Amino acid sequence: MDTREKLIAWMLGDLSAEESRPLEARLATDAELQRQRSVLEGTLRAARAVPSADISQAALQRLFSAAALIDPEPEETRAAPAAHGDADIHVGELIRIDFMRGVLPRVAAVAVIAFVLGLGVWLTPGELQPTVATVRDDKGMHVVLDGELVEARVGETRRITFATGEVLLDGASSVRVRSTGANSAPAFEIERGRVVVTAAATPLELKVADRDVRLDKGAVLAVDYDRAYANIADNGAVVEVQRVPIGEVAALAEKAYGIKLDVGGIPENVRKYRVSFYGSGLDADAFVDSFIESASHFGITLDDSRRYLGYQSRAGTAPLEEWQLNIALLEGSASLRAGAETLQLAGRTPEAPNFVSVSAAAATDARTLDAEALSEQVVWAAGAEGAPIRHLRDVRQSNETLPSRTVIHTDTLVLNGEQGRRIFKLGGPEFDFPLPGGRKGRLVQLTSSGAAFEVEGELVREFVPFGQQAQD
C-alpha cells in the first residue's frame, strides 16, 4: 500500500492504529501530504452531502481513489480548454474546462461524484462546510466540520485529531471545533468536561470559561471545566448530572422518568445547592437513590413513599459553585488571558506556575505542581493513546469495567450488582473493591469515565473504566 492509498484508508477509518501513527506524524510536517488530504477531504464532504443512501463504502473507496488522481493544475500550467461537444468526454478533462477554472478543488470532487457514480447531483462551493478535524473512538473515524460540537458521553473517551495536534475528551465532555483557515490548525471552545490538548507541531488557541488560552508549539495542556450541565438519555441509559441545583434535579426526574418529587419541604435556598452524579443503565428507582445519595450531604431526606423530599439542617455544608476550572500544563509553555490580564504557564520551573484554578466565586489561584499531582489531572486517560500517557505515573487500566448500574458521585462510588448495593468512599481506609486477579483496591479518584483505585500490596493505581454495558 503506497502513501496515497494509506491516506485514503486513514480518512475512511480503515487504517490500523500501527499504520496510522507514522502517517499522522508525517501529516504534521509534510506540506504535500497535507495538500493531498485537503483535496480528498473535499471529495469526502461532497460524497456525504449527496442525498442518496446508495453510496456504499466500496463505492466511496473507488471515488477517493479516482479523486486523488484528479488534481487541477496550477493556473500557469493549464492547457487551453478542450472542446466539449463530445458527449463521452473523460472526467479528468471535464474538470479542466472553462467554467471549472476559477472554483475550488472540492467542486471537481463533486463532478467526480456526479459523473463517475452517476448520481446526477450538483452542489456549489457555498453548500459545503470545510472539514477541520476527525474524531476517533470505538466506532471508528468521523469527519468534524467547522463549528461542530464534539461530545463524549459517560463511560467513553473520544479523540479529535488534526494535522498538527489532538484533543482527548473524557466522558461528559463537550468541545466545539472551529476552522481558522485553510492549512491552519483549528481553534477549540471547551464547553464542559475534562480534555487534554496537544499542540504537537503548531501553536493552538482555546477558549474556556470566557478565558483565552494559547498553547505554544510542543505544549500539552489538561483542562478540567466542571460546569453545570444535565443529560439523561434513553430513559437512564446515560445519566449525567453535573453541578445541577437540587430543585432542578427533581424536575429532571419528572421529565425523564415521569416521577413527581415534591420539594415543598425543602427551604428555597437549599433547593439551589448543587449536586453531581453519573450513571449508566439507571431505572427510575436507581435515579432517585442516586439523587438522594448526592443531596444527603446538604441534609435532603426522602420519605417512605419515595415522593416527598424533606430537609434536616446540617452544619458546615456549603453548596457547589456554578463552575470550577482547573488548567494544568503538562509540557511546554502556554498563556492564559482573562480580560486585560495574561498569566504565563511554563512547565515545572520556579519562574512560572504550571497549574491554575479558578471558580465562579474564587479568584485565580496559580501554583506549581509536582509530577505526582500533575498525574492526577490525567488519570482518566489511562488506556488512551497520545501525549497524556507520558504523564501517568504508576497508573494502569483495568481489563474490566465497572458494572452496569454503577453510580459515581463526587465522593463515593455505588455498585448495584450481584453482591448487592455497595458504597465505596473516596479516600477511605478500606481496600475492599474487587479488582481482576482477586486483588483488592481502595478508591482514590473519581472521574466521569471511571475510578482509580490503589492496589493493596502494590505501589500502583488501577483505573477501572465506567463501562456502558446493557442493564442486567
Image: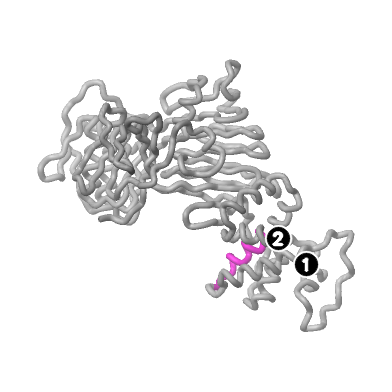
Residue at the farthest left position:
304
Look at 85% across and 60% down and name the residue there: 75
Mark 2 or mark 1: which is in front? 2
Residue 239 rendering spot, x and y as whole percentages? 33, 47
Q: Nearer the viewer, residue 56 or 261?
A: 56
Classify mark 1: helix, strand or loop.
Answer: helix
Look at 35% across and 32% down and name the residue there: 454
Which quadrant does the N terminus fall into?
bottom right
For this view, does 24 lie left or right of residue 324?
Answer: right
Mark 2–mark 1 Cα distance, whole angstroms, equals 30 Å
Say what amino acid the circle numbered 1 marks. Met
Residue 408 rendering spot, x and y as whole percentages? 31, 40
Q: Are marks 2 and 1 in contact (CB under 8 Å)?
A: no
Residue 367 rendering spot, x and y as whole percentages? 51, 19
Look at 72% across and 57% down and name the residue there: 36
Q: Which residues are magenta?
A: 40-52
Say what amino acid the circle numbered 2 marks. Asp
The dominant secondary structure in magenta is: helix
For this view, does 420 lie left or right of residue 44?
Answer: left
The residue beneath circle 1 is: 100
Magenta-colored stretch includes residue 193: no
Q: Residues within 10 Å of mark 2 (few under 14, many from 20)?
A: few
Is residue 342 visible in the rendered image? The answer is: no
The residue beneath circle 2 is: 2
**Label total for image:** 2
- Does 94 sit above or below residue 30? below
